[in-house]
Image (tube, rainbow, N blue to C red):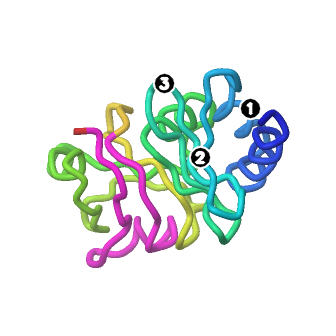
Amino acid sequence: MADDIEGLGHVADYQFGAGAGNGLFADPDELSVTRTSSGRPRQIHCPDGRIGTYESDGRFRLGLAGGRRLQEILDSPAYRVVVGDESEPYIREGRNVFAKFVSNADEAIRPRDEVLVEHTDGSLLAVGRAELSGQGMAAFETGMAVKVRDGTD
């Protein structure tokens, strides 16, 4: 399993930046990895919940536990989409983020990136997949900015 964690850590470093693998998989002894029928790692869990899913396209889909870990190790604004009070309760419930409610977004975000959705006070509201670029989220008044996968409610 240590080899799995090391390999998954390299993928996380590539996807989220140097050091992300160490942050996501900081306690390898506490992690559990489920596998596909072919033996490939699939779900990575820790005592706090699901860190993420390793998809067949070679990328991670974040769970809330993974989002919390990334929030701690990544410098702001990396992979962050920030919203205010108006949409906060809906996003916590797992509803999608629309561009008109985005107050700030990492300009380096590309469509299909995994992102953290934060409140303006810095609390994590959800994790999901970017539908627009970070620049588009800030500029557009209509359209879905983030397809939310897991809300914190």
The quadrant where residue 49 appears = top left
Circle 1: element type: helix
What's the amino acid at mark 1?
Answer: Asn
Where is residue 69 shown, x and y percent of the image?
A: 55, 32
Give how far apart the Cα atoms at labels 2 and 3 are: 14 Å
Give how far apart the Cα atoms at labels 1 and 3 are: 17 Å
Residue that badge 3 annotates: 47
Residue that badge 1 annotates: 22
Tell me the magenta residue range.
125-152
The quadrant where residue 85 appears = top left
Circle 2: element type: strand
**Disc 1 packing (10 Å; few <14; some 14–19; many ≥20):** some
Residue that badge 2 annotates: 34
Q: Is residue 131 above or below residue 114?
A: below
Foreground label between 1 and 3: 3
Number of marks in the rendered image: 3
In the picture, measured across the screen, residue 85 lies left or right of residue 121, that is: left
Where is residue 144 shown, x and y percent of the image?
A: 32, 73
What's the amino acid at mark 3?
Answer: Pro
Please tell me whether residue 128 belongs to the stretch shown in magenta: yes
